[in-house]
């Protein structure tokens, strides 16, 4: 925009100088023609003095009109640099009548515009040859004066024009910016909000043109939000509703005599309770719920110890041994409840898929940025084809004898994602599966 | 022992009733909160099992009003919702324990006993585990009838582990219970080592990197 303004200014200054040149040229032409028209048919020698005073008056008038020349104090011989001087010369070039002594030095032998240098000064003249009277009539004007005047005009106009243009640019910039600011606010709002934030966009003031767009946008947010909430509410309610009948089944089961039937039923009810808990955990990881998750500094080593202690009876049922290997002490940025759920699911999964009597290792180490928990089992492992799929919901490893819900690792993945963490699978040395979770340190 | 069960799910109430009766408890059950509150006043139960989601009068409200009337009977809350806020509110209103549905009857039995024991002057004087006998009032430990000399910390550690049989206690849990200040890094290992030397290697099992436990 500034470039365009500069261009405009340059163009107008060029135009200005061109127009000014034309004004001066016209003045020369007019003066000459007026003098010609005023000449008597026969100009006698004794009338020269009278003619000179007439010429002087014309010169006076034009200089004043066109060039803003100050009124002179009846000093005909004094030359002002703004003067248009008029001279009438004979065919041979002898000056007969001159409005000013200076003009006698100029010679004219060519009709139309001409330029000549006299005493180092540049003159521009317009000459006419009166055929009837055999006389040269010409008006001349100092060229330097012209450029000076043009410069003066330019100097007085251009700064005003420049400042004006600059102010106009600023005003335009401000107005456009102000006009676009609601859009900018909306885009900033959308950019900064998390993917799970479905609250409407609130703007204090916005132009009428934006009202419908904003309303539609907010309506869409509201609809998506309702749908998400309904889905989450359903999972939450369904899971809770299932807990009471499960409790009832467990209570009635107690009346059955010890034996295979009772054990099988108890096992199934146990699996179902596990599924219900996992569904609830997933519901709690829904976008809406994630808004209320607060991350804090959590000691990974201590939490692993607590979870292992809590899960130990389950491992003991399969005659498994668990050990915790603390390579580093890691304080990670997480939520205790969710991190606990993550570790519970990791261990639950590992215990579930391990053989009786297996050994399970949990290792805590880390780097400068991450705390790392690895759960190393020596079970059947997972083929590399399946390694990607196990993170998906309800995916079950094909050949596994044990039936799982297929939710465990997807919960682990979702929780790790909430913590901005990473997750990976690899094969344990000498067979088995190692699940690795990286969580940013709390620093 | 007399149990008062306030639970709105008829089938669950029936199951719990049958199971607890078989285990030798006397039990009365009510389906509505307001009826339950009247029963708390009229029947002198030893332990109250209270569901939180009740018709007419909500479980938390029953608890609040009962405590306001000066009822000190231990209350065990059961609920299908695992919202922590609700749990804390329940404990704040004077509940003594909290059990999430579905629960195992053995677990419920154990919790009832623990509550009863707490309400009636704590543990019994004598504690037996295999061939180890502990007389808590005298702080004396016998192995196969022979008195064993234990330090104060060793005795406390043994009691902690025996009170939480089959449960792994983490090093941090043990240290927080045994010491007021941060102990020296291997102090706990030394006590465990001494206990094993005095009472038998098999008594305490180590879970490497985690803690210790005494098998059930």
Image (tube, coloured by chain):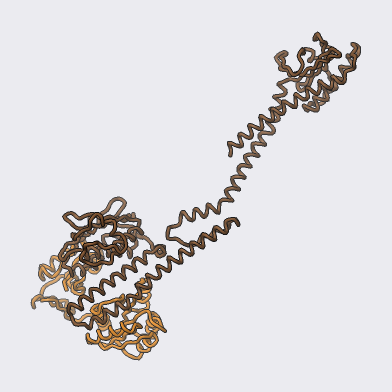
Chain colours: A brown, B orange
Q: Residue furthest front?
A: A398
Horizontal and vertical percent for residue A152?
70, 28
Horizontal and vertical percent for residue A299?
29, 60
User: Is any atom of residue B152 visible in this view?
Assistant: no
Residue A306 lies in quadrant: bottom left
Q: So how many labels did they put on this image?
A: 0
Q: Residue furthest top?
A: A92
Q: Residue furthest bottom?
A: B42
Q: Nearer the viewer, residue A213 or A313?
A: A213
Horizontal and vertical percent for residue A151?
68, 27
Instruction: Judge left or right: residue A51 versus residue B54.
Output: right
Q: Nearer the viewer, residue A324 or A27?
A: A27
Q: Nearer the viewer, residue A437 or A350?
A: A350
Instruction: Judge left or right: residue B9 versus residue B176.
Output: right
Which residue is found at the position 54% from the left and 53% from the top?
A183
Which residue is found at the position 80% from the left and 17% from the top?
A128
Of the 4 image quadrants, the one containing the N terminus of chain B is: bottom left
Q: Where is B107 relative to A360, above or below? A: below
User: Is any atom of residue A210 visible in this view?
Assistant: yes
Which residue is found at the position 66% from the left and 34% from the top?
A159
Residue B146 lies in quadrant: bottom left
Horizontal and vertical percent for residue B30?
34, 87
Which residue is found at the position 33% from the left and 65% from the top?
A337
Q: Where is A169 relative to A426, above or below? A: above
Instruction: Judge left or right: residue A162 versus residue A260.
Output: right
Of the 4 image quadrants, the one containing the C terminus of chain B is: bottom left
Residue A161 lies in quadrant: top right
């Amino acid at each position: 925009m500034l470039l365009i303004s500069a261009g405009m200014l340059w163009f107008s200054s060029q135009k200005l100088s061109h127009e000014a040149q034309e004004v001066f040229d016209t003045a020369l032409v007019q003066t000459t023609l007026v003098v010609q028209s005023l000449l008597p048919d026969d100009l006698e020698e004794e009338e020269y003095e009278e003619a000179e005073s007439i010429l002087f008056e014309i010169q006076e008038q034009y200089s004043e009109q066109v060039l803003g020349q100050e009124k002179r104090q009846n000093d005909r011989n004094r030359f002002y640099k703004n003067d248009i001087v008029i001279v009438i010369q004979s065919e041979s070039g002898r000056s007969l009548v001159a409005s000013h002594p200076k003009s006698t030095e100029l010679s004219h032998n060519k009709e139309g515009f001409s330029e000549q240098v006299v005493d180092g000064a540049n003159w521009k003249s317009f000459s006419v040859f009166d055929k009837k009277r055999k006389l040269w009539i010409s008006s001349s004007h100092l060229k330097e004066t012209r450029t000076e005047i043009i410069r003066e005009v330019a100097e007085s106009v251009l700064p005003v024009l420049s400042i004006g243009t600059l102010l106009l640019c600023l005003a335009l910039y401000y107005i456009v910016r102000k006009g676009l600011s609601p859009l900018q606010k909306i885009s900033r709002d959308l950019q900064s909000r998390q993917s799970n934030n479905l609250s409407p966009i609130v703007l204090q003031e916005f132009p009428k043109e934006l009202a419908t767009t904003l309303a539609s946008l907010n309506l869409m947010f509201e609809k998506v939000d309702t749908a998400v909430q309904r889905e989450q509410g359903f999972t939450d309610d369904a899971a809770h509703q299932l807990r009471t009948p499960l409790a009832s089944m467990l209570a009635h089961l107690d009346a059955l005599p010890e034996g295979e039937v009772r054990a099988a039923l108890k096992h199934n009810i146990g699996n179902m309770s596990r599924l219900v808990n996992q569904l609830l955990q997933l519901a709690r990881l829904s976008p809406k719920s994630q808004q209320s998750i607060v991350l804090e500094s959590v000691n990974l080593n201590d939490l692993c110890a607590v979870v292992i202690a809590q899960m130990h009876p389950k491992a003991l049922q399969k005659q498994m041994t668990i050990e915790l290997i603390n390579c580093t002490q890691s304080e990670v940025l997480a939520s205790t409840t969710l991190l606990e759920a993550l570790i519970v699911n990791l261990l639950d999964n590992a215990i579930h898929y391990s053989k009786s009597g297996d050994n399970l290792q949990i290792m805590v180490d880390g780097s400068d940025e991450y705390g790392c928990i690895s759960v190393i089992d020596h079970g059947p492992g997972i083929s590399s084809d399946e390694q990607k799929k196990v993170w998906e919901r309800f995916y079950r490893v094909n050949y596994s004898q044990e039936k799982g819900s297929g939710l465990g690792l997807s919960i682990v993945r979702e929780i790790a994602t909430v913590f901005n963490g990473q997750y990976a699978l690899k094969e344990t040395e000498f067979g088995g599966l190692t699940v690795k979770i990286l969580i940013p340190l709390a620093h | 022992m007399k149990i008062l069960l306030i639970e709105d799910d008829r089938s669950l109430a029936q199951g719990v009733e049958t199971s607890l009766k078989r285990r030798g408890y006397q039990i009365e059950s009510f389906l509505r909160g307001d009826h339950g509150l009247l029963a708390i006043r009229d029947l002198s139960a030893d332990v109250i099992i209270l569901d939180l989601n009740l018709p007419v009068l909500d479980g938390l409200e029953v608890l609040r009003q009962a405590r306001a009337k000066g009822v000190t009977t231990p209350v065990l809350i059961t609920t299908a919702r695992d919202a922590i806020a609700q749990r804390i509110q329940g404990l704040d209103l004077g509940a003594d324990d909290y059990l999430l549905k579905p629960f195992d009857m053995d677990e419920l039995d154990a919790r009832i006993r623990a509550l009863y024991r707490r309400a009636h002057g704590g543990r019994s004087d004598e504690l037996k585990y295999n061939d180890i006998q502990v007389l808590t009032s005298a702080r004396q430990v016998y192995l196969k009838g022979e008195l064993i000399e234990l330090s104060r910390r060793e005795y406390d550690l043994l009691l902690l582990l025996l009170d939480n049989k089959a449960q792994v206690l983490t090093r941090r849990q043990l240290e927080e219970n045994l010491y007021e200040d941060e102990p020296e890094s291997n102090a706990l290992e030394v006590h465990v080592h001494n206990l094993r030397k005095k009472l038998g290697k098999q008594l305490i099992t180590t879970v490497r990197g985690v803690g210790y436990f005494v098998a059930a």
